[in-house]
Image (spheres, rainbow, N blue to C red):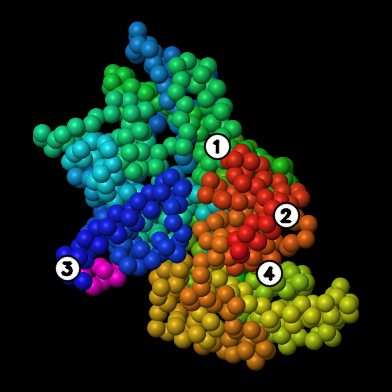
Amino acid sequence: MTLADAQRRHASLAAEIRGHDYAYYVLAQPQIADRDYDRLYRELSDLEREHPTLITPDSPTQRVGGQPVSEFKPFTHAVPMMSLDNTYSQAELREFVNRTQRLLPDQSLRWVVEPKVDGLAINLRYENGFFTAGATRGDGTTGDDITANLKTIRSLPLRLASLEKVTIAASPPQLLEVRGEVYMTRAGFEKLNRDRQENGDEVFANPRNAAAGSLKQLDPRIVATRPLDIVLYGLGGIRYAEGAREAFQPASQAELLAWLKKLGFKTPERTWFCHTPEELVAAIAELDQWRGSFGYETDGAVVKLDAFALRQQAGATAKAPRWAIAYKYAAEQARTRLRQITVQVGRTGALTPVAELDPVLLAGSTISRATLHNEDELRRKDIRLGDLVIIEKAGEVIPAVVGVEWEARTGCERCFEFPKQCPECQSPVSRTSVAGEETGGVVWRCSNLDCPAQIRGRLEHWCSRGAMDIEGGGEVLVAQLVKQGLVKDVSGLYRLNVFDVANLERMGGKSAQNFIDAVAASKGRDLWRLLFGLGILHVGAGVAKALAKRFASLDDLVDASRTGLDNVPEVGPIIASSVARWFAEPRNLELIQCLRQAGLNFQSSLYKPEAAQGGLAGKTFVLTGTLPTLKREEASARIEALGGKVSGSVSKKTDYVVAGEEAGSKLAKAQALGLAILDENQFLELLKSARG
């Protein structure tokens, strides 16, 4: 291929991939299967490897091309980024409308209502149609330059759609700054926290903290592993070259949102246009009903004047515009007494403080324990033993202590001293790295790998349903096995006999035999379950399956980890490095040898190097409720065998929801979104059709 041919093919591939990115990440309407997309992407990467001069800043391959930085550089916004005044009161909202009307007498005001996305405000700069920089709000005038991190967000266009010959302004702006919000999807947040919990890492308090923490990472390769997205809704600065044709200037919020959409940006899912306070209140109430179906967290509604000319007349205070306000929905909270703080030790040695509370009803369940995250958070909020505390379900998932009722203090409250020794084994604790990765100096960890708490955590994870699925291997039995010194690592489970187990408290002969039989049955589990069960940092069930599809055996994976794990779907450089470190540890290799001697299966039934996609390729399923005959694991296996994916949460990208008895909230959300809902018979018919 000549250089000219390579240039033409490169331009064609880049444009095609950008189009598919827009369809998938912005419109949520994928046009091709993942396998076909990967083929296009590999071809583009190969072309750039052969002809490095073809690489451009807006190439799809350059989204995760940045190297770690030592610090973020300052970035000055073309127009200051102001914050919004906010209210929780309908009366104050009405007064805001009346006050604005007094500023603009004799004007007919039209208002726009948008969801207030609970994320991190950002500013994007485009020059001559190309994304050149992005930054946080900072102090409103100057923020942190996080361009490399923002490039990893696939829904953020690296070039404006006008350069792709979309019918809009013929000349792109010489300079364009647009404002919006980076957020973490609900489904992505839940999965990220599950994976972090399984890996013994500290979980994030809520999606907003997770998004903010992700964008503050100095290594864009870490950011690329986080499920971040972006929505754009504001204009910073706009400037055209002198004499530019059709230099479009939006005159209202409605025009701006339509224009941003044409330029290739993701904009708010729903907007309401209102003329009276009553209409505003009704729109905000309707948004409150809708927001549960969004794929992201919202904490309120943003009310803005639609016409830009009227905004200019209304003006601003020193920190906020007079033409906009944020109406915040009150989070469901509860107040209760903090009686004690216990410290849990995870399987990677992480020490997590947990609040022991007087039981209280919150969001439909009784809460008696809540996370305090880490020592720094404990100090920052000045939480003391005996305090009357405020709790809420952070991100609707994890109960967390969010504040203290200061006026309720009596002087008898006591500060909690974080332990300097592991509460389980009394080994020293330190804020060091885990598995070679820096933790940022926040999490205290026990340095003793033989700590009973870590051993228990590793054993419970190994026995869990998603890993080796050993019935009976729960918290109570595992605690006794470790306490009696019968098991020191997962291979020790395979050296147990019925008499060992039967002699434990509350274990009779039949129960002991059932457990031993379950342990023996686990020897035949597939390779991906074993990989997941080993608890390798960053290797959740999805990554374990991806590795099992690429490598026929555990030995092949071990060999590949020594030279590099390339071209494995869902395995980036961070995960590859973690896997390589794990298999480089003599202690872990000794464990593998013990498992081999115990007769565990090291072969992968998922290994299909040249397998066809299957009839369900590109389709996403959610399973909910109890099916009449199929177990959930069996249904998942059938879907994946035909190339489909199984997700734990319902979103607009879900293709099918398979619902059984007691389906609950997932079914309700699917109905609200108008998704295809199947019972077991319809599901089996679909499988039959996909196989044919």
Q: Residues within 10 Å of mark 3 (few under 14, many from 20)?
A: few
Q: Residue at x 42, y 25 (%)?
A: 112
Q: Is 157 placed left or right of 187 in the picture?
A: left
Q: Which amino acid does label 4 sit on?
A: Ser
Q: Which amino acid does label 2 sit on?
A: Asn
Numbered disc 3: secondary structure: helix
The reply to whether discs 4 and 2 touch (Cβ–Cβ < 8 Å) is no
In the image shown, does 183 or 428 lie closer to the viewer? 183
Q: Where is residue 86 in the image (x, y as percent from the top left)?
A: 46, 29
In the image shown, does 530 or 534 lie closer to the viewer? 530
Quadrant of the rendering where the C terminus is positioned:
bottom right
Precedes in sequence: disc 3 or disc 1: 3
49 falls in the magenta region: yes
| Residue located beneath label 1 in the image | 291
Quadrant of the rendering where the N terminus is positioned:
bottom left
Q: Which residue is drawn at 56% across and 34% down?
A: 290
Magenta stretch: give its range. Answer: 45-53
Q: Distance between the residues labelled 1 and 4?
A: 34 Å
Q: What residue type is labelled 1?
A: Arg
Residue that extends furthest to the top in the rendered view of this protein: 106
Splitting the image into 4 quarters, where does residue 605 fall? Answer: bottom right
Q: How far apart are marks 3 and 1 (CA)?
A: 51 Å
| Residue located beneath label 4 in the image | 464
Q: Residue at x 23, y 31 (%)?
A: 248
| Residue located beneath label 2 in the image | 681
Q: Which residue is drawn at 57% across and 75% down?
A: 606
